[in-house]
Image (cartoon, rainbow, N blue to C red):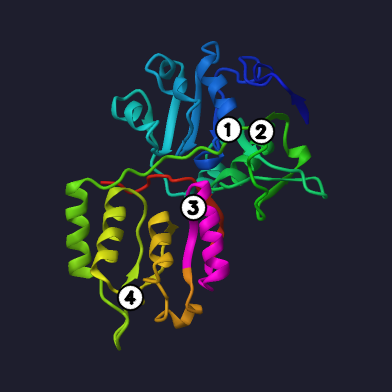
Amino acid sequence: MKKTIHVSDIINREILKPGSVIYTAGNASTPQILLKQLGDDHSINHVALYSVLLLGDKIDSLFTEERCKGLTHRVIFNSHLTREPVNKGWAKYHPMHLVEIPKYARQSDGFDVVMLTVSGPDISGQYSLGTTVEGLLAAIRSAKDKGGIVIAERNKKMPFVLGSTIPAESIDYLIDTDYELPVSPVKAPDDVAQKIGDIIAELYIQDGSGKKPGSTLQYGIGEVPEAVTNAIIKKGVKDLGIHTELFSGAMRRLIEQNIVSNKWKKSVNFAVSSIFLAENQKGMIGCTIIVRCKVVRVIILIRYFVLQHIQIWSR
């Protein structure tokens, strides 16, 4: 592993050669310093960049029309940063389920370069992949199998998340950084979104405080889910359940107000069932307090996969 203090030493035309296929971590783990340099250095061209929900306030230069002429974006999941270039045809939309990314890495020509954010090492020399994994581990293996390179930011703010880790020898270049993990704030619902939420709550949300099971919820982040949450609180129902892919801040509000009890989910120990969590830093702390103090356990079915206010579903 080579450590550096200058990002231009590791993100340049000599390392990212024309024809390189790059996979970058996204969500709260978006390596902003690496990607900013990639956006700023126009001598790096004829490269492809695969990404999942890129976030951050430092990487706007990646998505200008001019930069997209030398950098082919292959956007697997859109964020607010990639939506305009995709819609205008500057970037390519590459729809793929998260579970398919490892398969794609194995069956395609793979990736030449992987950019990511890590924390660590721990006492055994392992580096954590941080808050986001999706296809990251498969991308790293793909790159190493074909003699490619792995470039990492070690962000001081990135927590050491147990689960997927890599040894130091898997990282070719490392730069230390220190900035808050990126977030994508969810907008408050407008009148139209709230009307939709009211209709959904009125038609489909059933109270569970009597002899019949209450509704079990599954939704994501955005104006409409926020509106549905507002409508559920206003309706005054109790003893609902949560069985969801993404556990959001809106759902946390329902737990805090004792609307969700999971009392009808006996087969899964009366617990919230989720695959990954979406929150800002304050909300994540609140979620931890809820889990510990209110005995509402969150079952992470695949991995502790934290996303920072990522707007996956929105009106």
> Distance from label 1 to label 2 (Cα)?
8 Å
- Residue occupying image coordinates x 51% and y 49%: 282
Residue type for callout 1: Pro
**Residue 230: quadrant of the picture:** bottom left
> Distance from label 4 to label 2 (Cα)?
46 Å
Residue type for callout 2: Ala
Confirm or deny contact between disc 3 and disc 4 (CB under 8 A): no
> Distance from label 1 to label 4 (Cα)?
42 Å
Residue corresponding to mark 2:
152
Confirm or deny contact between disc 1 and disc 2 (CB under 8 A): yes
Disc with the residue nearer the chain's start (1 vs 2): 1
The magenta segment is 273-298
Q: Helix or strand or loop: what does disc 3 sit on?
A: helix
Residue 31's tag is 1
In the foreground, 142 or 5: 5
Residue corresponding to mark 3:
283
Residue corresponding to mark 4:
238
Rendering coords of residue 42 (x, y %): 51, 12
Q: Helix or strand or loop: what does disc 4 sit on?
A: loop
